[in-house]
Amino acid sequence: MSRHTTPGPPPATATLADLERRAADRAAPRHHDDDALIVCDRLVRIFSAEGVEVQALQGLDLLVRRGELTAIVGASGSGKSTLLTILAGLDTPSAGSATVAGYDLLAMDARTRLRYRRETVGFIWQRTSHNLLPYLSAVQNVALPMKLRGRGGPVRGRDRTRRALELLDLLGIADRRDHRPDQLSGGEQQRVAIAVALANNPSVVFADEPTGELDSTTAADVFAALRHANAELGTTILVVTHDNSVAGQVSRTVSIRDGRTSTETLRSTAHDEQGKTSTVSREYTTIDRSGRLQLPTEFTRPLDIRDRVLLELRPDHIEVRPGQDADTPDSPRDDAADSTRDDAADGTRDDAPEDTTDDTPDKD
Ligand SMILES: Nc1ncnc2c1ncn2[C@@H]1O[C@H](COP(=O)(O)OP(=O)(O)OP(=O)(O)O)[C@@H](O)[C@H]1O
Ligand SMILES: [Mg+2]
């Protein structure tokens, strides 16, 4: 059975109407803050099972801009699926705030929630069998969400089939249009699932380990299809993955630890003097709106940092030093550090040090 390894280009004759609209939209100038599509602020989700409380999300902050393709990574149990199901409107948070495309996820009534799920988001599950109805062909599966939207939807009648075919073409599987899921490979099923998620032209697509059941080559094909959809349609995509090679292909990877965002890796393309291009990636520690950040244990353990630290403000960075034990008297060094900080805080400091070593905790 022949299989496309990469998704094809957008169809030459039948162009997706929204492809043009979104391209025009992208070209329009926007205010920086207007671009925020997903905003989570101190999001909390507590599960209670048999008298035991599990804090799956413990005050998670996240901002995703329109058009971004972001990977979410983290250990098993760190809260990735919990976050995605909340953002998709399938679960409600216990506290905090979450807004997606202007919808307040904590304040939606049942009717608004249904509309949000049908119109604003698309979802791709890890299990290929969860994404498609087994007795419908690929093209019928893609047309179904448009039918469910009914008359109020933007695509009617025969146009639904046309749009479904355009989406299958965009994802490189138009030749499988009449195959049922059991006649498709796992990778092909996931690419049809991407088309289903895109059917109603959502603002954002969430994907929870969409390549988790696939071998690495097929996973790369499916991920290429997701990237292609993001690049061509401008759809914002948030994808949870365990696969480092997949996470390495996006410009932003957010890492979740114990129900909070802990680090972020940003990747960009650099050109050297010979004109060679390479990808530069840098890991940043995230800092929440209250100024809290988590020091990585690989930094704190060698310095025996526990309980408390001394902070010193430098012209372009902050120094973090191990604090002394509570029963140890202050050392002269600590006095100096304190007075430096006091002076800096009231703006009277005149001993700006020469040392401007970059100690940002990036561990490339
Ligand atoms: N419905 C539930 N009831 C009770 N606890 C739950 C429920 N759903 C998730 N949890 C708990 O919340 C925590 C986060 O779970 P979550 O499924 O979000 O993790 P994850 O990061 O997606 O993990 P994985 O990589 O294994 O999929 C876990 O400790 C889990 O046991
Ligand atoms: Mg999960």
Image (cartoon, rainbow, N blue to C red):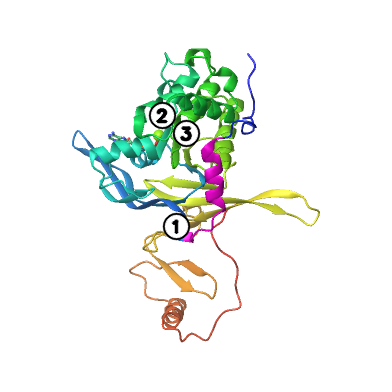
* Main SS category, magenta section: helix
> On the rendered image, what quadrant is the N terminus found in?
top right
From mark 3 to mark 1, how far is it between C-alphas?
23 Å
The residue where tag 3 is placed is: 198
Q: Quadrant of residue 116?
A: top left
The one nearer the camera, 263 or 33, is 33
Check disc 1: other Cα within 10 Å, few if <14, some if 14-19, many if 20+.
few
Tag 1: amino acid: Asp
Segment tinted magenta in the rendering: 16-32
Secondary element type, mark 1? helix
Between label 2 and label 1, give the one nearer the viewer: 2
Residue 21 lies within the magenta run: yes
Tag 3: amino acid: Leu
Secondary element type, mark 2? helix
From mark 3 to mark 2, how far is it between C-alphas?
10 Å
Tag 2: amino acid: Met
Residue 226 is left or right of residue 131, and the answer is: right
Secondary element type, mark 3? helix
**Tag shown at residue 146:** 2
Image position, residue 222 (x, y; %): 56, 29
From mark 2 to mark 1, how far is it between C-alphas?
28 Å
Residue 10 is left or right of residue 336, and the answer is: right
The residue where tag 1 is placed is: 34
